[in-house]
Amino acid sequence: MSEVSNVRSNGTLRMIDGKKYRGYLEAGETEAAFYQKGKTEPLVRWHYSRLHRMDNIRRGGTSSQITVILKDESRYVFELDYGLKLFSFMDGHWADKPVKPRTRGDVLHEEAERRGEKIQVPKKHLITRRHPNRSIAGDIGIYLLLVLFGIAMVFPLVYLIGSSLKPLDELFRFPPPVWPNNPTMDNFSDLFVTMGQSYVPFSRYLVNTVFITAVGTFGHLVIASMAAFVLAKYEFPGGKTFFAVVTTCLMFSGYVTGIPNYLIMSNLGMIDTYWALILPAFAAPIGLFLMKQFMEGLPTALIEAATIDGASQFRIFWSIVMPNVKPAWLTMIIFSVQSLWNTSAATVIYSEAKKTLVYALQQIQAGGIARTGQVAAANVIIVAVPVLIFVLSQSQILETMASSGLKD
């Protein structure tokens, strides 16, 4: 680069893997380069023809943050003392930058400003129709249909909660009321009294279930994510065959694999231990399948750019891949928690002190008609945890890879 017309500023460079370097950015008429402090060779260099987008955030005075995104999806973030000057210089010499579309309204606004006329700003409506080409009757019909489906979906949950709050006489009334006339918490108090009279405390069943669910879900997430990353982004002998086997395993329910799992755990000496439930959860095929499908949507150029920047494979997996597939692993957590939380483990755990909460509540359900109210309260406790986890993470679970804007 020519030293005469160059523009230079001290600052820092942040790579896509999070690493920061102190030095200076020097921009010429055709290219720009960042030099690390004390180095003579540029750490990063690009020609303006490789630019895809530049963003500038003013920090105050002449300092600003400049984000440079190249056509190969490499991204560099600079914090510069004279960022405004460098941004204007690079933007001025960026010959083939994308043309900003201009509408007829933009031209009329500029002419009005030159004439000193007041610009008429359109009023913002309180409610904006997403599909203005659809009739009002069509909108009403769609909303009515959505309301009906919403009522049908929420009705079982409302009825379940209502049953847990009903006194015993209302539980056997016909037709059964959806919501109790005289709500009471006696069913929950009776449930805890009954559980407190058992040989093993209620808290012990709860701790067993929480431990099995937490460890099993965490191990499933880690193992499935790492295996999916390798299968999705690397080619190796037998990779496609292995994934085909995993896909085939999705067809088998837990009833089919119950006997093989028991035989394997028995040979390993893990019957009547927590690991008889935790280890099979690690190998659940649904997590690997879900994560692999999502990770295939990540651009390979993003991973290659991080590798060129010096990021390790684990750093790429943890800092780049996992944040971009957050909807996938949150959905996987929902499936894993629901499966482990609702398991009774009666076939592999025999000691009463190691049994799960669902098993204890099932014993209460076997107590007859007198415990119908306690059974309703127990069902609410069993359902509460998976529903609560879904409610807290639904915004992330419902995201799609299209919303991230990452495409090859």
Image (tube, rainbow, N blue to C red):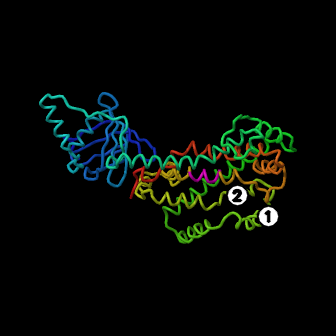
At label 2, the amino acid type is Leu
Name the residue located 34 percent from the left edge and 55 percent from the top edge: 72
**Quadrant location of the C terminus in the rendered image:** bottom left
Give the secondary structure at mark 1. Answer: helix
Spot occupied by residue 298 in the image (x, y as percentages of width and height): 44, 56
Would you say the magenta stretch is mainly helix, strand or loop?
helix
* The residue positioned farthest toward the front in the image shown: 174
The residue at which mark 1 appears reads as 266
Spot occupied by residue 285 in the image (x, y as percentages of width and height): 61, 62
Res 246 → quadrant: bottom right
At label 1, the amino acid type is Ser
Report, in whole angstroms, how far the alpha carbon at label 2 lies from the one at label 1: 13 Å
Q: Are marks 2 and 1 in contact (CB under 8 Å)?
A: no
Give the secondary structure at mark 2. Answer: helix
341, above or below 347, in the image? above
Magenta-span inclusion, residue 84? no
- Circle 2 residues within 10 Å: few <14, some 14–19, many ≥20: some
Residue 169 visible in the picture = yes
Q: Nearer the viewer, residue 370 or 385?
A: 370
Q: Nearer the viewer, residue 261 or 108?
A: 108
Marks counted in the figure total 2
Rendered image: mark on residue 160: none
Spot occupied by residue 400 in the image (x, y as percentages of width and height): 46, 52
The residue at which mark 2 appears reads as 279
Point out the stretch of residues depicted in magenta: 331-337
Name the residue located 72 percent from the left edge and 54 percent from the top edge: 343
